[in-house]
Amino acid sequence: MFAPKYRRKEIYGQKKVEIGKILRQLCEWKNVEIIEATACIDHIHMLVAIPPKMSVSGFVGFLKGKSSLMIFERFANLKYKYGNRHFGVGDFMLIQ
């Protein structure tokens, strides 16, 4: 689960589409299969299949860090709400 900082309701309209594209692209780069994903207005749920050679925390760190940078590149006005380059909350949840 990923959530914008302060759980702000930011994931809608064109942002929702662009964030989905970013997450799909990043998963393709790491050969991670998205099994299921749902974007709500204030968070995103993702069920992914990560290759055995990759650590879960390493992939999540990559996904959250790189997606944050790419979101700020496409939506520069977000820096006024979230500060520079800090779109998401630092936590994640893992269910095996």
Image (cartoon, rainbow, N blue to C red):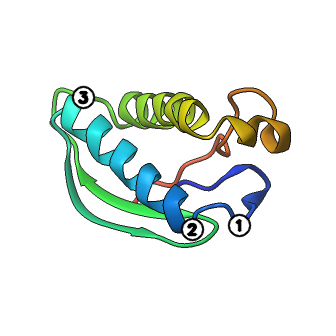
For the residue pair 62 and 55, the one nearer the viewer reads as 62
Q: Is residue 16 left or right of residue 72?
A: left
Judging from the image, what secondary structure is the residue with disc 2 in? loop
For the residue pair 1 and 94, the one nearer the viewer reads as 1
The picture places residue 71, in percent across and down from the top left corner, at 54, 38
Between discs 3 and 1, the one toward the N terminus: 1
Q: Give me the C-alpha separation between circle 2 and circle 3.
A: 31 Å
Q: Amino acid at mark 2?
A: Tyr
| Disc 2: CA contacts within 10 A as few (<14), some (14-19) or many (>=20) | some
Pointer 2 residue: 12
Q: Residue at x 44, y 64 (%)?
A: 45
Disc 2 + disc 3, Cβ < 8 Å: no
Disc 2 + disc 1, Cβ < 8 Å: yes
Pointer 3 residue: 54
Q: Is residue 58 left or right of residue 92?
A: left
Q: Amino acid at mark 3?
A: Met
The picture places residue 64, in percent across and down from the top left corner, at 50, 37
Q: Is residue 31 visible?
A: yes
Quadrant where the C terminus sits is bottom left
Q: Give the number of the disc on residue 9.
A: 1
Q: Residue at x 31, y 30 (%)?
A: 55
Q: Residue at x 51, y 55 (%)?
A: 93
Disc 3 + disc 1, Cβ < 8 Å: no
Tell me which corner region of the image, top left, top right, bottom left or bottom right, holds residue 7.
Answer: bottom right
Q: Residue at x 42, y 36 (%)?
A: 63
Q: Is residue 1 visible?
A: no
